[in-house]
Image (cartoon, rainbow, N blue to C red):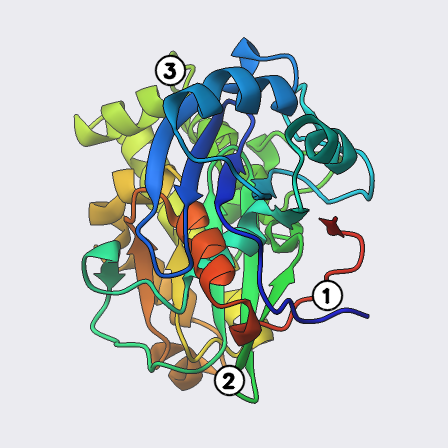
Amino acid sequence: MRETLDALSFPVLFADIGGTNARFALLETPDGEPVYPGNLETRDFATPVDAVRDGVLPRTDLVPRSLVFAVAGPIQEERTPLTNCHWIIEPRALIDAFGLDQVLLFNDFEALSLALPTLAGDDLAPIGPQVPPPTGNRIVVGPGTGLGAAGLLNVGGSWVPVAGEGGHIDLAPMTDRDNAIWPHVERTGGRISGETLVCGSGLLRLYRAIAATDGLPAPLDTPAAVTAAAEAGEPAAREAVELFAEYLGRTVGNLALVFLAHGGVYLAGGIAPRIADVLRSGRFRAAFEDKAPHNALLAGMATAVIVHPRPALAGLIGYARNPRAFLINLDGRIWS
């Protein structure tokens, strides 16, 4: 098993590829400053090769020798299909098209975890008074299209990212209100998981379940409409956002126990920054810490929203600058 990489060949082209957008960065040397040639919509290009050739390289004079991509989906050797996107990542095709020395792939939340050692100050919006220590295990959880999660373990001074599917752990009712709402929740695969309710479509499910419980109409049909109505004081939407924060706290607290995340718990994705005021109101932390007999353990763990504009790219760039700071199984994810 190959666990360390001495160095990448520079310049390096980085990409954070989601279902809708692909965000790019270039780094000429390990100690240089990244440049950002812009974002592309994946629907505008048939393949990643087309996107790099026609959408990225015309915007820069740099000729990359390595590509490092974060992709939304599990890495599958020679052909990696992306979740919610028609692109298929074929490293050999990229090497042949651009004469590259290396192509390296990460899962998108694995890439986010790589950023955690370097995020600080204005990159984070704390939830609660706790301050994480410079070492200690960390987790990143991101409610967005789904509910992604990854851990970052500190092992002998090296960082070990752990990708997983923690967003799919079960979410159970705990209060009388939960018990009233649960029969009206639209299941996913016959069950209710964290991702069933704690993601964009989950917020809409939660709003509709609350309205059905209370015999109210449910005219809102997008997550953005629910958050906007909540800000305007619409009762079902407001409760949906508040319960969303509570259920996020429960789910994240479970993962924090699994990883013993003394180094902090970090929230990524597009939803958390938009509901930061609700997250800071107390329900998130109360649910996060309500883990008897380990309430005190959770109370000592810091939580924060990531507000860095390009955190996955920051993680990839941090790895490229100093790959020996990380222990990563490179089998099946690096091509040369």
The quadrant of the picture occupied by the N terminus is bottom right
Viewer-side label of 1, 3:
1
- Write down the quadrant of residue 135 in the picture: bottom left
| Residue nearest the observer in this picture, 3 or 62 | 62
Task: Give residue 2's position: percent from left, percent from top.
Answer: 76, 69
Q: Which amino acid type is shown beneath numbered disc 2?
A: Pro
Task: Give residue 84's position: percent from left, percent from top.
Answer: 63, 24
> Around disc 1, counting alpha carbons within 10 Å, would you say few (fewer than 14), some (14 to 19), or many (20 or more)?
some
User: Would you place residue 190 above or below residue 38 in this image?
Assistant: below
User: Would you place residue 243 above or below residue 145 in this image?
Assistant: below
As helix, strand or loop, the secondary structure at mark 1 comes to loop
- Write down the quadrant of residue 267 in the picture: bottom left
| Residue nearest the observer in this picture, 329 or 306 | 329
Please name the residue that numbered disc 3 is placed on. 220
What number of labels is visible?
3
Please name the residue that numbered disc 2 is placed on. 293
Please name the residue that numbered disc 1 is placed on. 329
The residues bearing labels 3 and 2 have C-alpha atoms spaced at a distance of 40 Å
Viewer-side label of 1, 2:
1
The residues bearing labels 1 and 3 have C-alpha atoms spaced at a distance of 45 Å
The residues bearing labels 1 and 2 have C-alpha atoms spaced at a distance of 35 Å
Q: Is residue 233 left or right of residue 298?
A: left
Q: Earlier in the sequence, mark 1 or mark 2?
A: 2
> Around disc 2, counting alpha carbons within 10 Å, would you say few (fewer than 14), some (14 to 19), or many (20 or more)?
few
Q: Which amino acid type is shown beneath numbered disc 3?
A: Leu
Q: Residue at x 46, y 24 (%)?
A: 56
Q: Residue at x 64, y 30 (%)?
A: 98
Q: Is residue 188 left or right of residue 142?
A: right
Residue 198 seen in this snapshot: no
As helix, strand or loop, the secondary structure at mark 3 comes to loop
Task: Give residue 302's position: percent from left, percent from top.
Answer: 33, 72
